[in-house]
Each structure stands twice: as structure tokens, then as C-alpha cells.
Image: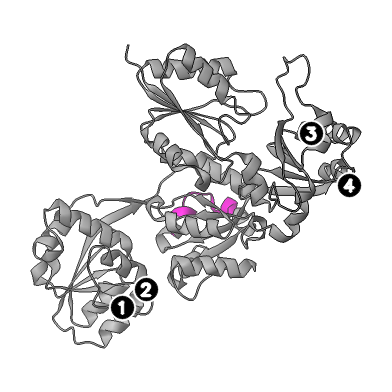
Amino acid sequence: MKRGKVYLVGAGPGDPKLLTLKGKECLEEADVILYDYLINPDLLDFANPSAEKIFVGKKGSSAFRQGEINALIIQKTMEGKIVVRLKGGDPFIFGRGGEEAEALVEEGILFEVVPGITSAIAAPAYAGIPLTHREISSSVAFITAHEDPAKIESSVDWSRISTGIGTLVFFMGLGNLEMIVSQLIRHGRNPDTPVALIQWGTRYDQKTVVGKLKDIEEKVKGAGLAPPVLIIVGEVIHLREKLNWFEKRPLFGKKILITRSKEQSKDFSDLLFYYGAEPVIFPAIRLLPPDRWDELDRAISSLEGFDWVIFSSTNGVQFFMDRLKALEKDIRAIHRVKICAVGSSTAEALLKYGIKADLVPASFQGESVVEAFNRMDIQGARFLIPRAKEAREVLPESLKRMGARVEVVAAYQNVKPVENVEKIKKLFSEGEISVVTFTSSSTVKNFTGLFDPEVLKGYLKKAKIASIGPITSQTLKEAGYQADIEPKEHTIPALTEAIVQYFN
């Protein structure tokens, strides 16, 4: 029987960008992924869409017992599949990866271990706590506060670690905080020793509670902490007052909903994450080819007859160029035509294909294009506008009134997706969404069409609305909503900065 291979992959502590390059490669290769509760679900986006994804629990009492997980890994590998066992943190640091590796060795199964960044070092770093410091602590110990219940006695030597180690890091210790505190004090640790508890370290909702051994239990009672929590004990915690960088970012702790298409969300998502927010991608637009290519194909075959091609979005550029390639043509087909790009992003998209726009209006909307051409003599000039199937008619109608001949063709269409609506409703109802962003009139129309109008109004009373520009804001107004945030420049970086400034 053909046998596959297993990768025991450490997923890191929560921030998806802390996944190693090797871990990402394994996810892309995998036929089957078995993942835990502690991994960030965004990591599954790296997987092949055809990969089988199996949640195996590990929250409190496991959805699967360890023996069942071992058996499942072996079964899938025996079927000749590439299996990734995706584990929070590092597989070999309190992750039971050693047990899984032993089971694979017993079956003669080929495997590799891909280390991950353990929460023991990542969570303190994101909380501004260096585990060692030349002047404060020269030693650190990792301890589990949740040992195997089958063990006759604890293997933690409290008499040694209490006073013999500079910094102590306890995994899974929230439920045993009272025991940890009492054991440390009883075995000689100063009751005034600083203690920090970090919940969901490295994630947007990271929460840190700081106290001393003598009062930390009281402080934790009112903090509402829940697992997973890491406990740090040691004088290095004093440095948090100076070094706390992560929790001081301007959008820290805020969930921001992105409604633009998934293909266009990465740059926006990265910017929001940079400022400390958790981006929630919920595309209100799904980009698809037009129902028929006839109109665009005819236009491409007669490009030499046009004087201008106007691209109003990066989507128009992408679909037009893809179709040019499909027809076995390249940019030489438009060498005689002048190019107008609506917006700097559209101009940049053209540059990627080696095309420098002849005209980029100062403002990023159709009206600014009309104003630019109004200063030219375009009587009798032929214009091609490849754009979305349904779009505003301001530009083509205005050009016609100036005496131009205008041909509008559908290069793509946007449809309303319905995935994850219940998930978003839950986030709204729990008050977790801080800002809803809209980057076009289409995102407004599609998004508002997914919800009951009265229910949505209730949701949006608790969240701020960010609009990329006046046209989108006008569409919001027509739908009964008011934009709280609107940048002067109608770009994604400017919208991000406007959100930051609003909360500052």
C-alpha cells in the first residue's frame, strides 16, 4: 500500500504572520490538515482548496482523544496522503508532538517536524516583557501547570524553581493560579515578585493583567480572563512599562470589517493589522467574468480604431489584460491608443503590465475624468470603457455630450456572495465589530442587501462606518446610513489613516 508523509507543524502562537515559511509550504502541499483549537483559522487559507481539513479539538476536553488523533494521522497517511498535523505554538513544547512522532515511528511512517514559535517567547514579547535581561534575569524555565493526571506525583521541583530560576513561564496555568502562587511563596519566592498573565498572546484581543504574587489572584478575579493564558513570574515584568509596544498600537483591540472582494483585501488587511486591528474579511463583492465575452473580444480585436481606453478600476485592468492574453495578444495591441486611469491604484495596476497612463485625473472618481476631458477637444473621438457589468453612467453620458463616441463593454461583473453571513451576524450581535468599511457603491448595495434593514440599523448603531469617498458615502446616505469616517484622498492607505486618526 502506498504510504504518504506527515508534517508535524507548529502554527505559532496566534498572529498568523508568525507562521514559518516552512510551515506555509507544508500547508500548501497537504492533502489533509488536522488542526487544533489554538491555531488561527486564517492559516487554513494557505491550504489547497481541495485539502481535507479536520478539526480535532483540544479545547478543555478534546473533541478527539490523543489516541484517536494518532490513529487518524496514521490512517490518512496509509492512504498515501500528505498529512499536516497543525499544532498551536511548537509541536515539541507541551504540544504532545513527541507522542504523535512516537506513534508514527512505530508504524514506520515518514515524518518531519516543523518547529513553531512557542507562545512562551512570543506572548511575553508582544506584551513588552523580555524573558531574559542582562541586568535582571539570566535564566528562564518553561513549566506546564497541567501535567498528565495519570502521573503519581508532580515532576515540578518547586523548591528548586522557586528561587533558582530568574523568569518562570507557566503554560495552561489559569485554573491552577492559586496553587502556583502558594507553591512559589511557600518555597521562598518573594511575595512582591511581579506576575503577568497574558490571554491570547500575539492576537488582536491579547489581554494582559499585571500584579504581584501576593495580589495577582485578586486582580485576576475582576479581569474576566479565560484560557488560553500564559503566566510569567519574574522581575523582568517591570520592563513592560517601557517596552509595551503591541497593545499601544492605535487600533489595538478593534475588529474592522472589510467588505471589498477577497482578491482585493490583502493590502487593506495588512495595513489595518499593522496598526493593531483584527481585519475581518467579509466580501460583499465576488468578481466574475461577464456572462459573455463577445463585446469585449470585438472591442479588443478593433483596438486600433479607438483614440482612448479608460480604465476606472484595478479590476477592469486585470480582466482586460487577462482577456488580451486569452486572445493571444499583448500590450502591443494598444500601442496607438491613449490610456486614462481613474485613480493612482488603477495607474499602478497598469504599470505592472508596462503601461504608463497618459491621463490620471487628480481626483479618483468619474466626475474628475469628465472635468479633465472637458479641457480637451474630443469631438468625434472614440472611447472604450471596459468596466463592471453594472456601473454609474456619469462618465460615458458626459463624454457623449461632449461629442465623443463611447463604447462601454463588460470586462467583469460583481455578484453578491452569501458565505459567512451567520458568522458576521454573530459578531455584530456580540458588539465585536468596531468599524465597517465600504470601498465602493457596490459594496454598500450588496452588503445592505444581505441583512434585514431594521436588524442592520441596530448593528450599525454600535459600529462606525468608514467610506472611501463621496460617491460611496452618497450611496450609504441613500440606504439610510451616514459615514462617520471619510478620507480626503480616496485610496485604501488614506482610508486606513483616516480610521487611525478617528480613534486617535
Quadrant of the rendered image containing residue 151? top right
Contact (Cβ within 8 Å) of mark 4 with mark 3: no
Which callout, 4 or 3, points at the residue further toward the start of the chain? 3
Say which mark, if any, is on residue 192: 4
The residue to which callout 3 is attached is 161
Find out whether residue 185 is within the magenta segment: no
Cα–Cα gap, marks 3 and 2: 65 Å
Give the crowd class for mark 3: few <14, some 14-19, many >=20 residues within 10 Å: some
Cα–Cα gap, marks 1 and 3: 71 Å
374 relative position to 46: left or right:
left
Numbered disc in front, either 1 or 3: 3
The residue to which callout 2 is attached is 365
Q: Residue at x 71, y 44 (%)?
A: 198
Numbered disc in front, either 3 or 2: 3
Q: Amino acid at mark 2?
A: Gln
- Is residue 442 at all visible to an observer of this figure? yes
The residue to which callout 1 is attached is 369
The dominant secondary structure in magenta is helix
Cα–Cα gap, marks 4 and 3: 17 Å
Q: Residue at x 35, y 71 (%)?
A: 344
Which callout, 4 or 2, points at the residue further toward the start of the chain? 4
Give the crowd class for mark 4: few <14, some 14-19, many >=20 residues within 10 Å: some
Numbered disc in front, either 4 or 3: 3
Quadrant of the rendered image containing residue 244? bottom right
In magenta, the rendered stretch is 445-456
